[in-house]
Image (spheres, rainbow, N blue to C red):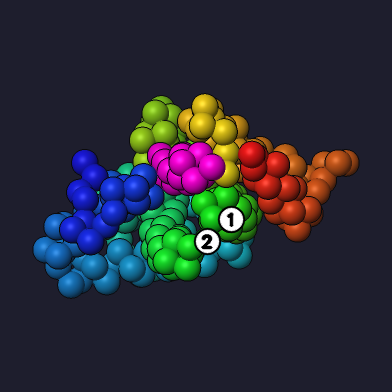
Amino acid sequence: MVQRRKDTPLDELALIMPAADMLSISADEARHERSDAAENRRRILAVAERLFAELGVEAVCMNQIARAAGVGQGTLYRRYSDKGELCMALLDSQMSAFQDEVLSTLREMTHKKRRPLEQLEWFLDGLVHFSERHGPLLTAARSELRSTGQENLTQRSAPFAWMRMTVIGLLTAGARAGELRADLDAPVIADLLLSALHPQQLLALRQGPTAHSITRISAAMRQIVRGLAA
């Protein structure tokens, strides 16, 4: 459940999703985590991230990660039952950092009275580049979880709800400010905008005979957002 912060305006609630819901380890668990267990977790994630970057996610096995991290296989599997969960744990950390950046920047833009559509343009541009950097990892995580019969877990664990609520919140703010039509269907428009940034869709746009550069994709997304103006 989203807990409202005392200094948070009601209109900003759409931009705040609980990062703990996305994490493999909750805040309470993290506080009580033994120092050796915390060190093992940090080492496992650091080694996995390095090996995935060097060799590709599909080419790296769990045993290889355990050996490189200097932990027993039992230690690794007690923490992460399969590679899909390990991928999601890496994404949790990266998404949490991205979320903090987004909340800080949007608050600053609001303080400077930047228009909601300008904020939406910035957010989607940031999401384009985030998906470009981490899309392969998310795609691999989904594939791994699906192969182990945990396909539904990807929908529950992936932070798409936060992205969607952020876009809906900014679209709604734009309609209230008169930038957009009052009868704007914000949820559907949010889904359409984000569908173009789904990792598999973005990968398709980046490859093949009609491949587009990330610069062109980013510019096109900005044009789409500007086209929403009333």
Q: CA distance from mark 2 to mark 1?
A: 7 Å
Q: Specify whether residue 54 is in view.
A: yes
The structure residue drawn at horizontal position 14% and vertical position 65%, both measured from the top left corner, is 31
Q: Nearer the viewer, residue 37 or 224?
A: 224
The structure residue drawn at horizontal position 69% and vertical position 51%, both measured from the top left corner, is 222
Q: Secondary structure at mark 2?
A: loop
Q: Which residue is mark 1?
A: 118
Sort mark 2 into few (<14), some (14-19) or many (20+) by Cα contacts within 10 Å.
Answer: few
206 horizontally vs 82: left or right: right
Q: Which residue is mark 2?
A: 114
The structure residue drawn at horizontal position 36% and vertical position 45%, both measured from the top left corner, is 14
Q: Is residue 106 magenta?
A: no
Image coords of residue 41 (percent x, y): 30, 64
Image coords of residue 7 (percent x, y): 23, 61
**Prevalent SS, magenta region:** helix
Q: In this picture, which residue range is highlighted in magenta?
A: 159-178
